[in-house]
Amino acid sequence: MNYRIIPVTPFQQNCSLIWCEKTRRAAVVDPGGDLEKIRAAVAEEGVTVEKILLTHAHIDHAGGTAELTKELGIPIEGPQKEDNFWIVGLPQQAQMFGFPAPEVFTPDRWLEDGQQVTVGNQTLEVLHCPGHTPGHVVFYHKESGLALVGDVLFHGSIGRTDFPKGDHATLIRSIREQLFPLGDEVAFIPGHGPMSTFGRERATNPFVSDHRG
């Protein structure tokens, strides 16, 4: 599975274009906005987008979803249903952060822990990782050792938990019990900032390293 990171919105959110090399079928993960940048990446890679995948429903990750799904006629998969209140509140989020007002949408498929999503011939595992938001999910492609973790974990940091229905202890548990067991060698694309590996974060991240006990 191939990927390309496309920073979008004033928050420089890492929207990802992922695709199956054999079929050239692709998914856009977290289209928060700046759809012209996403369209350009799709054209440059010569792939066909077949779905949108959402890790969670904060405005910088989901703000462009309704427009893109209408434009391409493709389904939306994710996040987990506990994030529906964030989707309903997208117009209020936009007003709060100065984003263009997006349309509210309903995912074609809510995701649950242990389910799978497909992109072309490739299969990604779904892990429910609440804490940043209650319905946050992570997408894991075992064959290439790659995880798309949204705002759960960052290089040297973790997601905020001071939003409605955020919870610090739950987030730490999601990282340690859902992500780290996947293996130290697994690389991850965070919602913001540079990529890292679970091993590096286990060793050095001040919030979740093994040294914290």
Image (cartoon, rainbow, N blue to C red):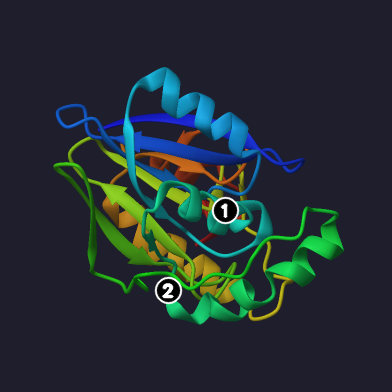
Q: Which residue is mark 2?
A: 80
Q: Quadrant of residue 192?
A: top right
Q: Nearer the viewer, mark 1 or mark 2?
A: 1
Q: CA distance from mark 1 to mark 2?
A: 21 Å
* Percent position of residue 39, x then y: 51, 31
Considering the numbered disc 1 on the image, is that residue within a helix, a strand or a loop? helix
Q: Earlier in the sequence, mark 1 or mark 2?
A: 1
Q: Quadrant of the N terminus?
A: top left
> Would you say residue 188 is visible in this rendering?
yes
Considering the numbered disc 2 on the image, is that residue within a helix, a strand or a loop? loop
Q: Which residue is mark 1?
A: 67
Residue type at mark 1?
Answer: Glu
* Percent position of residue 112, x then y: 32, 74
Q: Residue at x 63, y 77 (%)?
A: 88
Q: Residues within 10 Å of mark 1 (few under 14, many from 20)?
A: some
* Percent position of residue 75, x then y: 36, 59
